[in-house]
Amino acid sequence: MYTYEYLFNFTTEVFIKMGCSMADAEKTAKVFMAAELRGLASHGMIRIKDYYQLWEAKRININPNIRIVHETPSTAVVDGDGAIGMIAATRSMEIAIEKAEKCGTGWVSTCGSNHFGIAGYYAMMALERDMIGITMTNANPLVAPTFSISPLLGTNPIAVAIPAGKYPPFVADFATTPIARGKLAVAEKKGEKTLLGFVQDKDGNATDDPTVLKRGGSMLTLGGDYEHGSHKGFCLSSIVDIFSAVFSGANFGPFVPPSVAYLPVLDKKVGQGTGHFFGAMRIDSFQPSSVFKAKMDEWIETFKSAKPAPGRKQVIIPGEPEREKEIKIRKEGIQIIPAIANDLKEIADKLELNFDVK
Amino acid sequence: MYTYEYLFNFTTEVFIKMGCSMADAEKTAKVFMAAELRGLASHGMIRIKDYYQLWEAKRININPNIRIVHETPSTAVVDGDGAIGMIAATRSMEIAIEKAEKCGTGWVSTCGSNHFGIAGYYAMMALERDMIGITMTNANPLVAPTFSISPLLGTNPIAVAIPAGKYPPFVADFATTPIARGKLAVAEKKGEKTLLGFVQDKDGNATDDPTVLKRGGSMLTLGGDYEHGSHKGFCLSSIVDIFSAVFSGANFGPFVPPSVAYLPVLDKKVGQGTGHFFGAMRIDSFQPSSVFKAKMDEWIETFKSAKPAPGRKQVIIPGEPEREKEIKIRKEGIQIIPAIANDLKEIADKLELNFDVK
């Protein structure tokens, strides 16, 4: 087990060694740590190696000139200049919040970025300012549109954070696929089959074999098959892609750059880097803050009081499981599996840092 | 077969007879006709009877004072004052568009409204102004959250319309359930079973019986079951409900008023009427119009060129099937099944209008 502080400090030092300013390194470390705390280890310390290798391959810009390239009172297009995703995304969400302060809502589409960790982190930045936060990002292609066998879309997540009063905020953060890529990887490592409805083989046949992605298979959109509404998942994933990349001038669909260095840079570019989309809405743009929060509490209570299905406890309000994990993990510490701890030790050695493998 | 003009004029006259101004009657008729043209007959002429009966029961306000009750440069809360949904919604989307003209984007949450027909109609209003349009609405409860057997949510649709250049616009318009309520009704009328994953019985058991809604059953959210991501559909449906009703002060969740007069007015109210949410974003808030449209064309071409699954033609761009139906229906006329034509004749007789049953 590691403490939050230990891993936060280590991660900050890694990015300082790569050349980041202290401020940028801390911003980046915060997002990695938020993933660990929220129980989303697939977006936590395991990814440090990917970022390190992208840096080694000179595929991320450590000292970017992140700037607004176009704006209106309520919108901006931000060019991330090849930055670490966390740095471009944090700045973009700050701009969305600044715009919302002035005219009620702020909307930012960002190009020239990279993988940015968990989408929910940026949506939640709005909460402290009494705002609703929205985040979307496109991602490297793994997912086939309905009726197709070409993996053209990423798992393209959507996050929405909404403040409440006496209850914790509503925080939805979900990939527009039935399950996350990481869960397929886990099933594969364990040698297990999955359920049907998650992936198809290279010919478009339904399969429960999580390894088909390596042999031309693809993930399916939320809904699974057409009969169960996969075209709705395709709509959602497309909206994320268009808002993130067509709005900003980033690469869309199959042209989104890989977030790992072991995959080659793509030959064709249709824009700059990876794209994100951010929104911030002041709650008092709609209702006085106290009225809004009391109403959200009433909404949450209504759903918590729903009659549970047999064998279930109660309806889970989006964000609750992650919050419970955070409380537990803050108390008990963060578990890093040996393979990842060894990777981190290796990076530490290369960068002349210390890392204890526990 | 009926011509567009015949049904448009009839519908307009019906609403004038109910007391609407010519302008309001035409606004309402346009939305009914848009549903018929787009092949969504479940939201077309079949619903006139419901509206007529709600009017008879004095449950809709024919001469509403629709007004902005709160605003910022980019947002407004609109009180529909019990209006026909089409009238409150058209005005609300106009306000979103006016706001977007001035500060890049406009966002309107509307309370005190009623059933408003197809969500896509309002999103598409933005297209003629070179804007992206977004519409959401809550609806009377039929859908159970994941892990629950209480129908607390409506089919809560989301519509997003995005202009393109040489291609027709991207128009997504989908309920946040695997299938629409109307398709269950069709299966029920035909005495057919459905697939699993659409509904559950009163005890939360999976079933393929579309009639269970009448015996305490409920529809499921997009994803179907938890393992296939129904909690993501629950997140989406919740977001629609909160944006439509908590933002505006409308009734949320189980308190949304019925859209038919044969269901009683609910005892408990937590706000005013049904709620909607509208967004308009000028495309030149992000990119010059020509650049944006060329990029959307490239996006559409990329997805149209995806390799089809065996037995499939090509990827369907959202909005294509409805557009094809519109072309066909405009040419061939609108089919109204005898039972509905008879209902319309009956309403015509009561209002001293003519309606030919063909």
Image (cartoon, coloured by chain):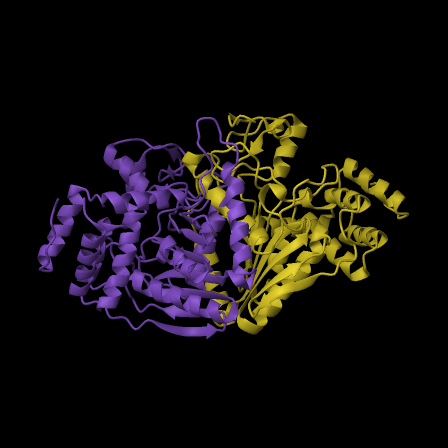
Chain colours: A purple, B yellow
Q: Residue at x 64, y 29 (%)?
A: B214
In the orientation shown, which residue stands out farthest toward the right? Answer: B352
Residue A284 drawn at (x, y percent):
53, 62
Residue B36 drawn at (x, y percent):
70, 48
Q: Residue at x 48, y 52 (%)?
A: A165
Q: Quadrant of the C terminus of chain B?
A: top right
| Residue A352 seen in this snapshot | yes
Q: Nearer the viewer, residue B302 or A180?
A: A180
Left or right relative to A107: residue A35: left
Q: Quadrant of the N terminus of chain B?
A: top right
Q: Nearer the viewer, residue A9 or A205?
A: A9
In the displayed structure, would residue A192 be above or below residue A358?
Answer: above
Q: Residue at x 11, y 49 (%)?
A: A356
Left or right relative to A245: residue B94: right
Total numbered labels: 0
The answer to which image quadrant residue B278 occupies is bottom right
Q: Nearer the viewer, residue B202 or A204?
A: B202
Q: Residue at x 44, y 47 (%)?
A: A145
| Residue B313 seen in this snapshot | no
Residue A322 drawn at (x, y percent):
36, 45
Q: Nearer the viewer, residue A100 or B317?
A: A100
Left or right relative to A186: residue A318: right
In the displayed structure, would residue B156 be above or below residue A211?
Answer: below
Residue B122 drawn at (x, y percent):
63, 57
In the displayed structure, would residue A176 be above or below residue B131?
Answer: above
